[in-house]
Image (spheres, rainbow, N blue to C red):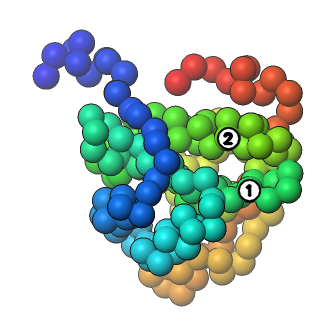
Amino acid sequence: MSAAWRDAAPAWRLRAMREGDLDAVMAIEGRAYPFPWTRGIFRDCLLAGHQALLALEDDRPAGYAVMSIAADEAHVLNLCTAPERQGRGLGRHLLRALLRTARDHRVQRVFLEVRPSNPQAIALYHSEGFNEIGRRPRYYPAMQGREDALVMAMELVDGDMERMPPL
């Protein structure tokens, strides 16, 4: 593998997730999580009109994100990169796309939950401006019972997207 290829930015393309994408989404979800969302949850999100993005790399599904928007708040419900594509900036790319959408909908505050056992995701959210605001006890299923969720939030203020460093 040449150094030029390794250093080249991946060719990601984002588009709206469709019901026809759910086989590919479920395949990624099943590889990424020991307790994946069901097809029904994804379908319900699409039917509810939630913002749902599919990330394609070289026209192959590589990740996705789902966010609900109500009034002036948004909630990141799921953000996932295929395990074999993690660590290359796709999660950040998806998150920033959600934040731009939230900004376009005049959202003032974005929330999410994350497992304390997922330090890479926590680091990503902190680096993009999210702060821990609380904890939901026993929120996630776990191998040994249940795991808490860290609740994180970000205030969207004028000009914040323009001040973010490039990917």
Residue at (74% x, 37% y) in the render: 104
Which comes sooner in the sequence, label 2 or label 1?
1
The residue at the point 53 percent across, 41 percent down is: 94
Describe the element under mark 2 as helix, strand or loop. helix
Residue at image mark 1: 69
Quarter occupied by residue 73: bottom right
Mark 2–mark 1 CB contact (< 8 Å): yes
Q: Is residue 13 above or below residue 67?
A: above
| Residue 16 in sight | yes
Could you say which disc has been placed on residue 101 in the image? 2
Residue visible at 46% across and 53% down in the picture: 17
Location of residue 109 in the rendering, given as x and y in whole percent from the top left corner: 82, 48
Q: Nearer the viewer, residue 166 or 114?
A: 166
In percent of width and height, residue 48 lies at 63, 68
Q: Nearer the viewer, residue 24 or 160?
A: 24
Helix, strand or loop at mark 1: strand
